[in-house]
Image: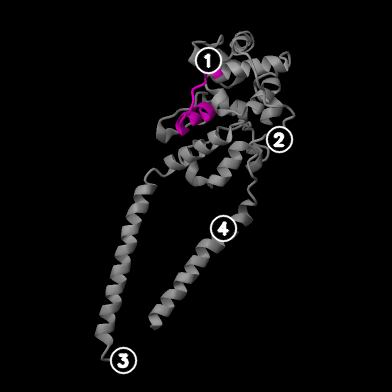
Amino acid sequence: MKELKILAILVVIVLIGYWGIEPYAHSVMHGEIKKPDYAYSDLKVSAPTGGDATKGKELFTANCASCHGLKNDGINPGMDKNTAITSFNVVPPDLSNIAAIVDHKFLAAFIKNPQEATKNPKFAMPPMAQLSDEDVANIIAYLSSVAKKDLTGKEIVVEACGRCHSVKYQKIEAETPKDNLKAYLGKIPPDLSVMGKAKELEYLESFINNPQNGLPGTSMPRLGLTKEATEKTVAYLDQIADPHRDQRNRLGIWVLGYLLVMAGLTFAWKKKIWKNVH
């Protein structure tokens, strides 16, 4: 009985350490994680509605296609990749699925003023102040009409992160060369292969929603992802960082059961051996 009491005390101490000390230490070291703002409430625009996709295509061709392609509709960018890298130090993204993963209110604000929307004063794209609110609504209606629905987490990571970040364990290489990224952002963005292990998922969600939340002063721009796209991104990063977790958890139950059985047998054997002594 004395041994059982000692075991119970040890179990309580371990549980306090696991659920009490670690979270407390984390909160002291990393501070409070800010909640994501999927309404992008700092942007003083409204989500556009009722746009004309046909007019939007004309506007896109006239104002955006010199740098951006739209593979879903067979539109190639007017500027080749090498010229774009030389000009901007970063590859302008293909916009085929942008309207499926980026909040439309954010997208409207971004088209008018990318630096303000992304919270990055050095963001390479110039403001499109010549476009009216109706023009912006038409462009977004067009982008929505060609965007693929229900993108996977991997597809979203490639679309939203792949210009700057590699995910080498998944054989995803950043589109922009490292030297250009360093010139554009001041440093080479980290590989995302094990980011889901290195950071808390709550932190990742907050950081993706607004990088300034987790790393004030970072040159990473705000992406404007929707809640669904952000959650799929975080889930994908979590899954690829530890692809054998489910298998390990299933095996862990059998291991715990084995240890409990062996502990019971050992305790019974010990009582039998020492019963005449006590």
> Which SS does the magenta portion mostly show?
helix
On screen, residue 18 above or below 200: below
Task: Indicate yes or no whether the magenta region holds residue 155.
Answer: yes
In the drawing, what numbered circle is on residue 23? Answer: 4
Residue nearest the viewer, comparing 270 with 89: 270
Distance from Cα at disc 1 to Cα at disc 4: 46 Å
Q: Residue at x 68, y 18 (%)?
A: 126
The tag on residue 137 is none
Q: What's the magenta region?
A: 145-162
> Which of the labelled discs sits on residue 278, or is there none?
3
Task: Please name the residue that numbered disc 1 is placed on.
Answer: 70
- Say whether disc 3 or disc 2 marks the residue closer to the N-terminus: 2
The residue under label 4 is which amino acid type?
A: Pro
Using residue 30 as the reference point, say whether residue 278 is left or right of it.
Answer: left
Disc 4 on helix, strand or loop? helix
- Camera-nearest residue between 252 and 242: 252
**Where is residue 91 shown, x and y percent of the image?**
55, 20
User: What secondary structure is marked by label 1?
Assistant: loop
Q: Residue furthest bottom?
A: 277
Looking at the rendered image, the disc whose residue lies closer to the viewer, 2 or 4, is 2
Residues marked 1 and 3 touching at CB (< 8 Å): no
